[in-house]
Image (cartoon, grey):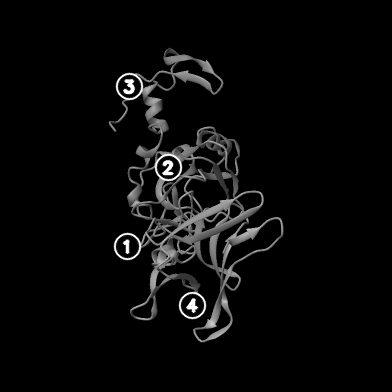
Amino acid sequence: MKHGSNLITGIDRHLASWKSDDDPASGEFSDWIDTRGYPQLIVMDGGDIKFRGGPWNGIRFTGTANLKTNPYYNFTFVLNHREIYYQYNLINTSVLMRVVLQPNGSLDRLLWMDDKQEWSLYLTTQIDRCDQYAVCGPFGSCNIDSSPICVCLKGFEPTSPDQWRKTEWSQGCRHIQTLDCNPGEGFNKYSNLKLPDTRGSWYNQTMTLVECKKMCKSNCSCTAYTTTNISGTGSGCLLWFGNLTDIKRFAENGDTLYIRLSASELGTPGNEPGHDPENRSGDEDLELPVFGLSTIHKATNNFSINNKLGEGGFGPVYKAPLLRVPPR
């Protein structure tokens, strides 16, 4: 079965839960490939999102790190001008398998155990509290291995510090320094993440990451970017506008996201209270080392004319003889 949409006929195939284990009437939960932006897997509780598996990254849905190559079935995702769908196929014909949206909203993959004559849980998408939709609010990152589980991303602070201290995280985080489309703004790189909610996002499957960064930088409302396909050398462009919501950190096998920050935010250490302690080395993930404005002032002798090398399309260029690049 194709789980998704036929864009030509308008047919949309999705899963719906039973009302209860023994009542096949329609329940409260449904499972969709949401196409309002870059397509992503979502489980709805009535009109609200309960769980978001995230967009397909060329290997798996970004929020389902446990969806891996195995001896029982293979899986694929198709996205073109005709269809958008997920599909899996058994490669071991001696087993029986099914995917069920349970009456409690859990999306489970079940394997038939012939010796016990029962269905056994093989895989479930919702593993811990960080799989609850947007538990840490906008610009918050959820890590089940941390205590508390919610932290603000680097360059952000709690929107409501009092609520944050009470572990009420729904209001999320805000920029420490407001973005103003200054040429000094750049991007901080985060690794091993579940990508944010892609509703309202924009994508292009043929662009390079360099082109993607350039497009995001040129649009003042663009807040983050990444590739759409991480397989091989990577390809495609995915842009976010506005708040970044429902981010989860994985220990490994997560995606990379580049978040727009002001020049001063790029120089902010990542281990202040309320900020992500796992991103202390965030500056080391940047393509180039980042220095604070005061350091550059000192290194160039307050932009002395004696240190001016010339001028180009981005403005004057200075040498900084006193600047020391930290070892990597």
Residue 311: which disc? none
**Label 3–label 2 contact, CB within 8 A:** no
Badge 1 vs badge 2, beta-carbon distance below 8 Å: no
Q: In the rendering, at what x and y percent does residue 134 appear?
A: 49, 62
Question: Is disc 4 surrounded by few (<14), some (14 to 19) or many (20+) residues within 10 Å?
Answer: some
Q: Which class describes the residues within 10 Å of circle 3: few (<14), some (14-19), or many (20+)?
A: few
Residue type at the position of mark 4:
Asn
User: What residue is pinned by disc 3?
Assistant: 322
Kindly indicate whether the residue at mark 4 contacts the one at mark 1 (C-beta within 8 angstroms): no
Disc on the earlier residue, 3 or 1: 1
Asked whether residue 227 appears in the rendered view, the answer is yes
Give how far across and how far down residue 20 sits, in percent: 52, 84
**138 w.r.t. 321: above or below:** below
> What amino acid type is highlighted by mark number 1?
Ser
Mark 1 or mark 2, which is nearer to you? 2
Q: Which residue is denoted by mark 2 in the rendering?
A: 189
